[in-house]
Image (tube, rainbow, N blue to C red):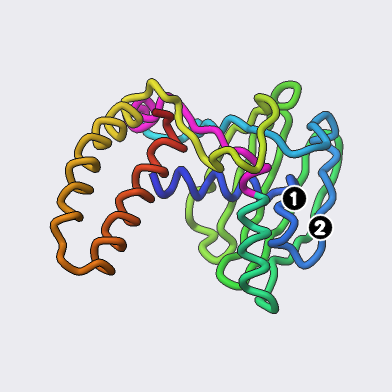
Amino acid sequence: MKTWIRMGVLALLAGLAWGAAWSADPPTPKVMNDAPTTAGAWRMESPDMDKAAAAQMGGGMTICQSAAQAMGQRDARNDKGAPRCQFKMVEDSTTQAVMEIRCPDSNQRMTINRVAPRSYLMSTQDLDEPAKKPLRMKMTYVGACSAKDSAISLDKDSPACQQMRSQLGELDKAKASCAKSGDAKARASCEQMLEQSRSQITSMCGK
């Protein structure tokens, strides 16, 4: 799951402008000239993902670029003066884009090819570990979304979501046990942690 989410974040950072993370806003690659000019929702699917893991997640995930940008901007306001990612376009044609993304903790080279209208295959190579196999992801525009939506969501009927939603009842039981704490501060902390877990599940998978 963590690798899958990381791939989605890398895809967002590539030319779709998670503005606050950059030292300067990167331009949209020519190969993506048919992409919407405003932020929206993108379906992420990895051709290299284990079939069993892909089936567990319903085949892919959806990232709301609007929500991701809002998160990035909030982080930037809380971390003013921190080093930003540097962007360099190595190749920019209507058939392929190659770009380098250099951040304080990572260096990536991403290649983008169009596979269908508003659908692109992205291959990301870790420049710090060039022997590692590149991560590949197919990214397809699926419509509008807002900053209030979940940044990452899974198919609500996927086995992964069914499993996570089954935990909601256990969270309710655990919340009841928080009330047994005699310390008001500990009780509030317990309830807050459980509520955050519930919100994360419902935002990713629905109720």
Quarter assignment of residue 30: top right
What's the residue type where badge 1 is placed? Ala
Residue range (magenta)? 51-68
Residue 169 percent location from the top left of the image: 22, 34
Residue occupying the point 18% across, 47% down: 176
Quarter of the image for residue 193 reads bottom left
Q: Quadrant of the rendered structure where residue 206 is?
A: top left
Whole-number angstrom distance, CA of label 1 to CA of label 2 = 6 Å
Q: Position of residue 31 (x, y in %)?
A: 81, 36
Mark 1 surroundings: few (<14), some (14-19) or many (≥20) residues within 10 A:
some
- Is residue 53 a member of the stretch shown in magenta? yes
Numbered circles on residues, count:
2
The numbered disc on residue 25 is: 2
Q: Which mark is residue 17?
A: 1
Measured along the vertical axis of the image, is residue 179 above or below residue 158? below
User: Which is nearer the N-term, disc 1 or disc 2?
Assistant: 1
Q: Look at the numbered discs 1 and 2 and tell me whether their residues touch, using CB distance below 8 Å.
A: yes
Residue drawn at the location 82% of the way across and 45% of the way down: 28
